[in-house]
Image (tube, rainbow, N blue to C red):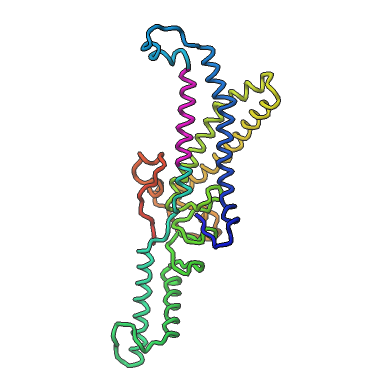
Amino acid sequence: MKYYREGQLLRYIGTWVPLGILVLIVLYFYVVYMETYLMPLIKSEYVSRPLVEINTYLIQLVHINDYVFSNKTIGITITLHIILILFTITLIRVVITIPGHVPVEWLNKIENEIRQMIENEENMINHNKKGSQTSTSFSSEIDDEQRLHLNVKVKNELIDKQGRRHCKNCSTFKPKRSHHCRQCKTCWLKMDHHCQWLNNCIGYGNYKLFINLLCYAWFLISFILITYSRCYYDTMNSYSSDAKLFLVSFTFLYCCFLWILLTAFTLFHLWAIKSNITTLEYCENKPREPLQKGVWNNIFEVFGKNPLVWFLPIQPDTKPILD
């Protein structure tokens, strides 16, 4: 989520506009699909297959599906709404889930390393001055300017020799594969990218949910594309009004366009999971450490080891790789 200073209300509201557009697109497809295809299909089956007069009410209940709705119509209705519900739940979860702050325990560990290194440096300085070893506590003979110089020296040593990464914006160290988001104004663990459409960063804490969202969106648009093609064909070969012809044609062609984009985007992220690489790492033009641990281990790192939750909007309890 984004955090802004006072006086930037319009900018903050503007960050939610892409998400609002995304919701309107989903609502548009749902309303047009229901009005131009599914509801007419239900009404036509109800009219063409009216309920017969049966004296026994129990028998009427048992055979109601045979006389009112076909299995195809029931299957389309149930499948559409199951995918739509899963998509909606996952969308909400991705938007509200924090991508993953740098753990306080890890920061405390680094601070202890810095404190210990500064203490060792001070002991060496005092030893050289007095010719003998002094106490292991912070020496009062070291002034503030020298201590500040030691602090900078130790941090540079951690960066240059030990390969620790330091964030200039947050003025603190960060684990490997963490990045600072200028819009969120913080560092996120294993940051993949900042998604304007979701008004949130995608990182360690919600990447699996993001992949679930992409898959649900792909299944939803594919399902609509396949079932709606019949409506598109019938409309193009019938004497429909110009308004309906335009609406059905535009919806079907727009659905094809989105399907191509979603397919490419989903395949890229599935490849990224297999290769254990983030979008930011893919876009960086600099050499990086090999992160291959095997395809299954890369999958387990994102989805967890329980296959039962892979396809559900549940974030697995996996441990982040900090060093």
Q: Residue at x 48, y 39 (%)?
A: 88
Q: Position of residue 147 (x, y in %)?
A: 41, 82
| Location of residue 34 by image quarter | top right
Q: Is residue 83 magenta?
A: yes
Considering only vertical position in the picture, is 195 above or below 74?
Answer: below
Residue 139 visible in the snapshot: yes
Considering only vertical position in the picture, is 289 above or below 78?
Answer: below
Considering only vertical position in the picture, is 71 above or below 54?
Answer: below
Q: Residue at x 46, y 53 (%)?
A: 203
Q: Nearer the viewer, residue 274 or 96?
A: 96
| Location of residue 54 by image quarter | top left
Q: Position of residue 154 (x, y in %)?
A: 42, 76
Q: Nearer the viewer, residue 308 or 185?
A: 185
Horizontal placement of 3 versus 111: left or right?
right
Q: Residue at x 62, y 23 (%)?
A: 233
Q: Position of residue 179 (x, y in %)?
A: 49, 60
Quadrant (top left/top right/bottom left/bottom right) for the C terminus: bottom left
The residues colored magenta run: 69-89
Residue 270 visible in the snapshot: no
- Magenta stretch prevailing secondary structure: helix
Q: Is residue 190 magenta?
A: no
Q: Position of residue 227 (x, y in %)?
A: 54, 26
